Image (spheres, rainbow, N blue to C red):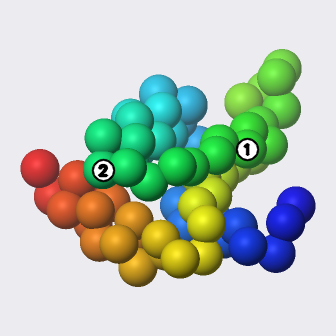
Amino acid sequence: MGTNLVNIFSTDKPYYAELIRQMLSDHQIHSFIINKQDSAYKFGDIDIFVHRDHVIRAKMLIREFETL
């Protein structure tokens, strides 16, 4: 993975990762989902990565999103 990408959020819920990704997209922040879950047992994390220039803004948006 490129050194310009930073993991800003992890969850075990695929739908929640997609909600976060879409919210970031609505704010013109490109993000990438890396699903590390086992397909049979559903353990593991789903990570969201953004470019390092957007880390602070993305984390602030996620914090606001989680308080809704």
Residue 15 x, y percent position in the rendering: 47, 28
Give the number of marks.
2
Left or right placement of residue 60 versus residue 10 in this view: left
Residue 57 x, y percent position in the rendering: 35, 72
The residue at 65%/52% (across/down) is 47
Q: Which residue reaches farthest top?
A: 40
Camera-side residue: 37 or 57? Answer: 57
Residue 23 seen anywhere in this rendered image of the structure: no
Query: Hey, which quadrant is residue 10 in on the image?
Result: bottom right
Q: Quadrant of the N terminus?
A: bottom right
Please name the amino acid that badge 1 sits on. Ile
- Give the SS element for disc 2: loop
The residue at 29%/72% (across/down) is 60
Residue 17 x, y percent position in the rendering: 50, 40
Left or right placement of residue 37 versus residue 26 in this view: right
**First of labels 2, 1 by sequence position:** 2
The residue indicated by pointer 2 is 27
The residue at 40%/42% (across/down) is 25
Please name the amino acid that badge 2 sits on. His
The residue at 66%/71% (across/down) is 6
- Give the SS element for disc 1: strand
Compared with residue 10, is residue 37 higher up or lower down, i.e. above or below? above
**Dot 2 alpha-carbon crowd within 10 angstroms: few under 14, some 14 to 19, many 20 or more:** few
Camera-side residue: 11 or 8? Answer: 8
Left or right placement of residue 16 versus residue 45 in this view: left
The residue indicated by pointer 1 is 34
Residues at discs 2 and 1 in contact (Cβ within 8 Å): no
Distance of mark 2 from mark 1, alpha carbons? 20 Å
**Dot 1 alpha-carbon crowd within 10 angstroms: few under 14, some 14 to 19, many 20 or more:** some
